[in-house]
Amino acid sequence: MVDAVIILIVLVLLFIALKGSVKHFKGEGACCSGSSSTLLKTAEKHLDGPVIAERMITISGMHCQNCSERVKRALDSIDGVSAVVDLKNGTAVARMDRPIDEIVLKKKIEEAGYTVLSVSQK
């Protein structure tokens, strides 16, 4: 009888863990210092001048909406850059109204805790 109770408890815990993992990887989990219910979406940043360049950045390590918002805030913190982040594709498009070195974009994303796989012109 005791063995059956232990097995039942283990199965319930495994179910809860699996359910949480699935939500996490679908971008619905409460990770990265916040939950979906407390997520503050970053507003679209308006540039001072016309867009002169766009860079497509492939990023590793984003698992949820909070991750993508952190990347957006990191890129938007650069003067002359406005970003749109696509969590499902693991990419960001950085629109620039002035010349910005790719190293600066990469550094900001890595400071936020993510890995840049590639940067290309869009």
Image: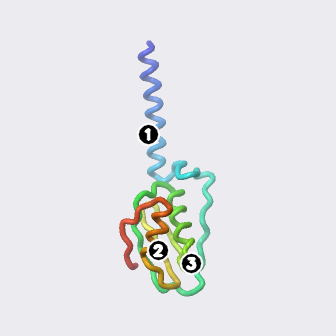
Q: Which of marks 3 and 1 is in front?
A: 3
The percent coordinates of residue 79 (x first, y second) are: 56, 78
Image quadrant assignment for residue 103: bottom left
Instruction: Indicate left or right for 88 with 46 as reference.
Output: left
Is 46 in front, or is 114?
114
Instruction: Bin the neighbour count of mark 2 within 10 Å (Cα to Cα): few under 14, some 14-19, many 20 and up.
Output: few
Q: Nearer the viewer, mark 1 or mark 2?
A: 2
The percent coordinates of residue 82 (x first, y second) are: 54, 75
Residue that appears at 60% across and 78% down: 46
Question: Compared with residue 77, is residue 20 higher up or lower down, i.e. above or below?
Answer: above
Residue with the mark numbered 1: 18
The reply to whether callout 3 and callout 2 are in contact (CB within 8 Å) is no
Q: What element carries label 1?
A: helix
Instruction: Bin the neighbour count of mark 1 within 10 Å (Cα to Cα): few under 14, some 14-19, many 20 and up.
Output: few
Mark 1 or 2, nearer chain start: 1
Q: Of the residues shown, which amino acid type is indicated by label 3? A: Asp
The percent coordinates of residue 2 (x first, y second) are: 45, 14
Mark 3 or 2, nearer chain start: 3
Residue with the mark numbered 3: 79
Question: Compared with residue 18, is residue 29 higher up or lower down, i.e. above or below?
Answer: below
Mark 3 or 1, nearer chain start: 1
Residue that appears at 47% across and 48% down: 24
Q: What element carries label 3?
A: loop
Instruction: Bin the neighbour count of mark 3 within 10 Å (Cα to Cα): few under 14, some 14-19, many 20 and up.
Output: few
Q: Of the residues shown, which amino acid type is indicated by label 2? A: Val
Per the rendering, the mark at residue 104 is: 2
Distance from the alpha carbon under mark 3 to that under mark 2: 11 Å
Distance from the alpha carbon under mark 1 to that under mark 2: 38 Å
Q: Of the residues shown, which amino acid type is indicated by label 1? A: Leu
Q: What element carries label 2?
A: helix
Q: Residue furthest top?
A: 1
Residue that appears at 61% across and 69% down: 43
